[in-house]
Amino acid sequence: MIDQPVLSKAVYLSLVVPCYDEETALPQFYADAIGICESINKPFELIFIDDGSKDATLKILRQIAHNDIRVHYISFSRNFGKEAAMLAGLQAAQGTYTVVLDADGQDPPALIPQMLEAVASGEYDCAGTRRVNRTGEPPVRSFFARCFYRIMRKFTDIAIVDGARDFRLMNKRYMDALLTLPERNRFSKGIFPWIGFNTKWFEYENIARTAGSTKWSFWKLVMYSLDGMAAFSSKPIAIVSVLGMVLFMVALAIIVFIIIRKLAYGDPVAGWTSTICIILFCSGIQLFTIGILGQYIAKTYTETKQRPHFIIREAQ
Ligand code: UDP
Ligand code: MG
């Protein structure tokens, strides 16, 4: 008799959960996620990625995985960032469908059955989620977030959806496409729309963290948005080139004006202040331009080094 593959053992749904110092949120998350997955009545797995946590996260994960064979974890040698954690989880996921979600309860696992239904119907390759409001977030942060989305839409050709979360459920086709992107400077908010496919959007009100605190400081977010811009657009370089050209034209006009004035009035020394202002202005623009070019060169340098995205210390 030919051995048939045991289909019922194949994983149907994988949950990928990046965790960084989430000791307070984990127990509740695990209970909620297991409840939802069991209600789906299909084989599933939970993959937690401990992104170099300094608290008891890894200890809790070891314990959970020890007691529940459906749970796996990957622990990094240090903090490599959420993007690296998501990537590690996606690479390890075995499921026909995979969903990425945060450990802090801000991505409600209760939405998973609906998302799964949309993708399993075959009509969509991916189910994405977006927050329709930012209640509970500092107003300054919301303001900058909105500006960021507006600038990104102007600067890049990809449509980044306002308020889109990384909370996503995808099929194999979508996952395979996602994993073909080898870049070190990963910016998922841009990668998702870049790879395309049909996405069904689910909207929900912002939910406060169940426990713990956000790992994103304001400056970390600013740097993340700059990274995103550099990863998906070279328009800043084009803009500074145009700026350089415009300034050159202005300088040319001023030179002509000064020559004519000298010939007419013979007073070349007047206007010291304005000269200094112009020199300062132009050198400022030059430094700014070099800075922008430097950003792209630095990114290229990181890519060419071809370092791994993360280093795993232990896994189960
Ligand atoms: N996270 C991570 N590595 C990091 C920062 C965050 O794995 O360097 C995880 C974190 O544990 C959480 C998710 O990514 O599960 C989202 O982080 P957080 O809740 O701090 O971000 P926010 O929801 O405030 O955007
Ligand atoms: Mg969160």
Image (cartoon, rainbow, N blue to C red):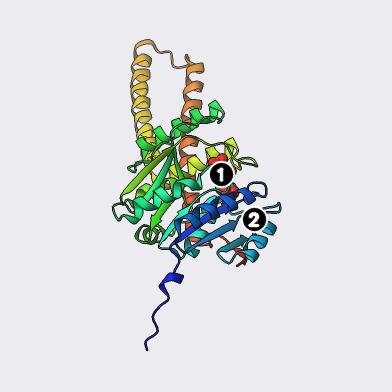
Mark number displayed over residue 9 = none
Res 161 quadrant in image? top left
Residue at the extreme bottom: 1
Q: Nearer the viewer, residue 247 or 43?
A: 43
Q: Which residue is mark 2?
A: 52
Left or right side of 246 for 72: right
Image quarter in which the C terminus is found:
bottom right
Residue at the extreme left: 123
| x and y, in percent, of residue 126 in the image | 36, 51
Establish if 2 lies above or below 101. Answer: below
Q: Circle 2 — which element?
A: loop
Q: Quadrant of ligand 2?
A: top right
Establish if 99 lies above or below 91. Answer: above
Left or right side of 6 for 82: right
Q: Amino acid at mark 1?
A: Gly
Q: Which residue is mark 1?
A: 105
